[in-house]
Amino acid sequence: MNRSLGPDDRVAAVEGGGTKFVCAVLDGDLRVAERAVIPTREPEATLGAVRAWLLDRGPFRALGVGCFGPAETRAGRPDYGRLLATPKPGWAGADVLGALSGLAPRTGFASDVDAAALAEGRRGAGRGLDPDSGTLAYVTVGTGIGVGVARGSSIVTGEGHFEMGHVGVPRGSHDRAGGACPFHGDCLEGLAAGPSIAKRWGAPLSALPRDHEAHRLVAGYLAELCRILFLAHRPGRIVLGGGVMKTDGLLGTVAAETEARLAGYLPPPEGCEGVADALVPPELGDDAGVVGAALVGLGALGEAG
C-alpha cells in the first residue's frame, strides 16, 4: 500500500499521446483497476471524452496528467498545463489541464515521457539504482520521440521538459529520403518516429523486411540518441518504449550499436557487464505512462509515491 493512500483511496491518471489518450483509475497500491483508450482527435472532443469518463468514476484523491508536448510543465506559470508549439495539428495552445480541472482536490501535470521515466525509476527498471542519485532515462519512440530523465525520486527538467527528440543526428550515408518533422525536417524525430518511418518508406518499421535499410538506419539514429544520453546524463538505465520499439530485434540492435559508438569511453553502469546491458524495455510495460501520471498527481498533492 502506498503510505499516502488508504485502502479505499483512488488516483486518476491520464496519459495523453498523439494517437490516443489512456485514462486509468489506480488503487491504493497504484495498480491499474480500470482503464479506457480514447482516440486523439481535436482537443475539445478528445478532452471532453476524457473528462466524461473520469466524472463517471470519481471521486479521486488526486489526478495526474502526462501529456505529449511540448507543453508548459512548470507549476505556477500562467500557461501551466497548456501545449506549446506542438507538431500535432490543431493542438497548439490546447489547455489540457484546464479541461480536466475540478476532478480531484489537486492535479499534477508533466510530459508523458517524464511521467513514464518517474514510474520506471521508482517502480520499474530503475529500482536497483541509488535512491538519491540513480538516474534513469526513458525514451519513447512512437508518434514522436521523447526523452524523460528521473534522478532519485524526481523528474529532471530545465526551463521546462527536455525535447531530445528534436536533436540533430548524422544521417546515414545512403539515407536520401526527406525528413518528416514540420519544424526541423531531418531531426531525430523527423527521421525515426513512427509517422516519419511510414512517410519515408511507405510502411511501419515492423512491416518492413528485416533486411530493409530502414532497420539499420533507425537503429543507428536511436543509438546516437542513447550515446548522447550516456554522455550528458550518465544514466544507470535507459528504458526504450513506444510502438516502434516493439519491432522485433530493434532494442538489441540499438543497444549493440550504442556500445559500439561509445567505443569504450565510459565504463558500464553499475550492475551491467557492458553498456548495452543498460538499455532495457519498460518493466512496467504499457502501464508506465499511467502509473507515472498517478505519481505526478500524488506529487501535486504533496505526497510521495
Image (cartoon, helix red, strand yellow):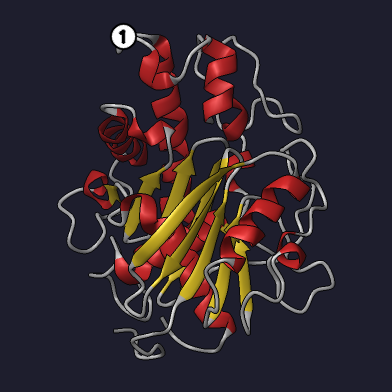
- How far across and how far down the image is residue 128, in percent? 23, 70
Q: Position of residue 231 (x, y in %)?
A: 44, 53
Asked if residue 17 lies left or right of residue 253, the reply is right
In the rendered image, residue 287, in percent from the top left (x then y), is placed at 37, 56
The residue positioned 73% from the left and 38% from the top of the image is: 87
The extreme left residue here reads 273
The quarter holding residue 220 reads top left
* Residue at left offset 36%, top offset 80%: 28
Whether residue 211 can be seen here: yes
Which quadrant would residue 19 be assigned to in this image? top right
Q: Is residue 133 left or right of residue 80?
A: left
Q: Position of residue 41 (x, y in %)?
A: 69, 39
Pick whichever, 48 or 121, lies toward us.
48
Q: Which residue is mark 1?
A: 211
* Amino acid residing under circle 1: Asp
Q: Nearer the viewer, residue 55 or 162?
A: 55
Which element is circle 1 on? loop
Above or below — where is 88 with respect to 269?
above
One can see residue 234 in this view: no
The residue at 29%/38% (across/down) is: 255
Location of residue 226 by image quarter: top left
